[in-house]
Image (cartoon, rainbow, N blue to C red):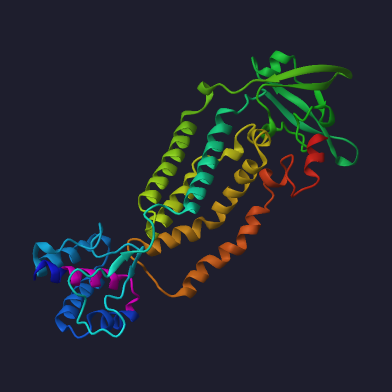
Amino acid sequence: MNPERWRQVEQIYCSALEVEPDERENFLNKYCADDASLRNEVERLLKRHSEAENFMESPAVELAARALFGEHANGCVEIPGRVPANTAVEDPAPAGAQQHGPGPGTDIVKNRHPKHAPWWMYAVAAAFVIWTAIHHYTVYRAPGIPGIAVQAVKGEGEAIVGSQIISVTPGSPAAIAGLQAGDRILISKSDRLLSPEGGVNFLYLESGRTYRLEVDRKEVKKIILLSVPMRRISSIKPMLILRMNADAFLLILAIIVGFLRPNDISARWGALMMAISSGAFVNWATQPGSYATLSGLPLIIRWLAAALPAVAASMAGPVGLTFFSLFPRRLFHRRWIWAVVWIPAVFALPMFLLADNAPIMSSEGWMFNPNSATRMKN
C-alpha cells in the first residue's frame, strides 16, 4: 500500500474511533462511499482495536497496521489506536459531489480546540495550589503548645464556666508564665485561650500572642500573662513533613498531567483525581492554630479553604470512578450510569458544605452561624 492510500485509511480509522460503535456503520458509509477496499482496511483495524483487552494490548493495533501496510503506518496519536478528543471529522467532498473515499491530500481529521488549556483549568489549578499553600502555611505558622492540661469546671445548672489546671509541663510557656496546677480560669476571663467546652482552644491559638488570664489561685485572683511562641520547625515531626511533601508532589504531578494533555478527557479526570487526593495526606484542620491562621487571611481565601475540602470529599468517589471508567478504555456509554454516579454526589455536596466543621460553622467571621462570633468572644 502506498503512503497516500495509507494516509486515507489512517485518517478515517482515527476519526471512526471517536464515533459511537452503533454509529460507525453510517460513518463508514459516508466516508468510504463505494470504495470497498478502503472500507475493508478500516474495518480490519477497528476490529483489531475492539479485540484489545486492555491498555497494554492496544499497541497490537499499531503492530497490526504495520504488518498490513508496512512502515508507512505511523499510528494515529501517541497512544496507538486512539485519537485525541479534540478532533472532528470534516466532510471531504462538497455537497452533491461524487467521491469514492477521501482524495489525496484531503484532511479528514482537523483540530477544533486550541492546544492551550481552557481558562477554567487554570482556575481549578490555582484553587488547589492555594489550598495546598494553606496546608503548609498553617503547619509552619502553628503556635507552640502552652503546656497545660485542664479539666472543665461546672457552675450552676451544670453549665461549664471555666477550667482547672491539672498539670503544667516544666519549661513550657505556661510554666514560664507562672501558672500552677490547681489554678482555675474562667472562660470569660481566659482571653479566648479556653474553648466553650472548657478545654484549651488549640485550633484558635495564635502564634506570638500574649494572653491575659485572670486566675483564681486558692481564692486569690491573679493576672498572668501567657505568651505563646511560634512552633519551632525542628519540633515538627518528620512524618508530618513527609506527608506534606507527598501532598505537594501529588499536586505538582496532577498539574503536569493536566496541562501536558489539556484536551485529553482521561488526563483531565486523572489530574483532578490526583489533586483531590493530594489533600488527604495532611489534615490541616487538626493543626494547632489552624483556624486562627485562617481568620487572618482574606475572606475569599477563607471560603476557599473551607469549601474546597468539602467539595473534594463529596466528589472524590465520583471523580475516581469516572477516571477509571475512561482509562485505559471506556467501560460504558449509557448516560443513565453517569447519572447514577454523579447525582448522589451533587445532592450530598450541601451536606458536606454545611456540616458542623469549624472552618464554616464556628470560625469567627463566618456567616453561616450568627452566634459563632459571639460565642468565641465569651
Q: Nearer the viewer, residue 169 or 56?
A: 56
Tell me: 294 left or right of 345.
right
Q: Where is residue 207 in the image (x, y as percent from the top left)?
A: 65, 25
- Asked if residue 201 is positioned above or below residue 15 in the image, the reply reads above
- Given residues 30 and 243, the one toward you in this image is 30
Q: Position of residue 115 (x, y in %)?
A: 36, 54
- Expressed as whole percent of the image width and height from the top left, the position of residue 266 reads 38, 59
Image quarter in which the N terminus is found: bottom left
Residue 11 among magenta residues? yes
Asked where in the image residue 193 lies, by quadrant, the reply is top right
Magenta-drawn stretch contains 275 = no
Total labels: the figure holds 0
Residue 180 visible at all: no
Does residue 3 appear in this view? yes
Q: In this view, does 333 lie to the left or right of 342?
A: left
Image: magenta residue range: 7-21
Give 240 or 219, whichever is nearer the viewer: 240
Q: Quadrant of the C terminus?
A: top right
Camera-side residue of 360 and 161? 360
* Secondary structure mostly taken by the magenta-highlighted segment of the chain: helix
Q: Which residue is drawn at 42% across and 46% down?
A: 255
Q: Looking at the picture, does residue 42 appear above or below residue 293? A: below
Please give the name of the residue rendered at 83% of the width and 27% of the height, measured from the top-left corner: 189
* Picture layout, residue 44 above or below residue 181: below
Q: Residue at coordinates 54% horizontally, 40% vertically from top-left?
A: 130
Residue at figure coordinates x 59%, y 28% from the top left: 141
Residue 289, image x and y in percent? Answer: 65, 32
Residue 242 located left or right of residue 229 = left
- Left or right of 353: which side holds 365? right
